[in-house]
Image (spheres, grey):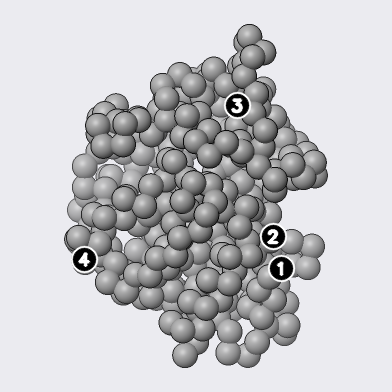
Amino acid sequence: MDALQKKSIITARGFTYTYYVSDPAQASKDAPTLFLIHGFPDDAQLWDGIVSRLPQYRVIAPDTLGYAGTSKPTDPAAYEFGAMAKDLAEILDAEGVDKAVTAGHDWGSAVAQRFYVHQPERVSALVLLNVAYSGPATEPFDLEATNAFLEKTFGRPLLAYQELLLSKEGPEIMRKHVGRLYDGMHGAPRDFFGELLGVRGNFKKWLLNENNDWDVEVRDYAKDPELKRLYVERLQRDGFEAPICYYRGNKEHIQHAVEKDMPRERFVVKVPMLYFICSQDAVCRPEAMIPAKLGGLVPDLEEVTIDCSHWSPLEAPGPISSALDDFVKRKVIS
């Protein structure tokens, strides 16, 4: 992100957001702005490989609430999607951008989705990486019931890792063992991600590694020592109490309380939409898009399959950039 300017803004809610912007004078005149939203537990640097490959676009990439230079409230209510959508709209306002191609990865996908739901006039197209579109949270989230369904459907309770995330000890364990967290999240074996996160108890066992008998080779992109150093330093400094609020918001029904009474029509995506399926992501499955398809929520959906695991912007920036550029040229510019 060295080519981008780092800025900050204090939103109407009183939160400071840091974000990165490219020089609009360098972008093509007819090119829309890309609004890039990262997920857990990353920061805006996640998008570096994609930004560098798309110099023809103006880019705005925030550090989302809870991360890096942005405020880190530890009340899950602060992470209600509609409230965060207003924060993000204020960033676009500050940059004089009416609407943008909005892309999100991991939890950033959920934030991008609800940015569209709450601020549809600000989104010219919606791009989701790894995490599928979901309809309104009409029922309270139940982790145990969800894992039981996933185990019956896929053979594994794919959200088993959230048991540690949502425990009292979870944030501190991750902070103390953030180097192990990095290695585990970016493990090279094809099924390692699913084994780590989708088997009860494995996530905690991996982080603690009490017997010093469980190691893994990381994927090629993750072998960059600078990438790991920045990751470890940032998360040891900032901790996980704020990032975990995205998960706690589900557990404490923050999103459900708002969405249960919203008209279903609000969740129909009426702009072009691109979904990146990542074939080696054992947790974020493409089947999760089926309810949105069957429910008529994504009428202008395109899907592209990339052969990579969960951290697709780091592992496959080239294929993602090419597909994104093609999509924007066909569906937004033309």
Callout count: 4
In the image, is residue 168 above or below residue 13? above
Q: Position of residue 248 (x, y in %)?
A: 42, 35
Kind of residue sitting beneath label 3 = Met
Which of 146/213 is in front?
213
Residue 48's mark? Answer: 2
Circle 3 residue: 174
Q: Secondary structure at mark 1?
A: loop
Q: Secondary structure at mark 3?
A: helix
Mark 4–mark 1 Cα distance, whole angstroms, equals: 35 Å
Mark 2–mark 3 Cα distance, whole angstroms, equals: 25 Å
Residue at x 34%, y 63% (from the top left corner): 117
Q: Earlier in the sequence, mark 3 or mark 4?
A: 3
Kind of residue sitting beneath label 1 = Ser
Circle 1 residue: 52
Which of the two discs, 2 and 3, sits closer to the camera?
2
Circle 4 residue: 296
Residue at x 74%, y 42% (from the top left corner): 223
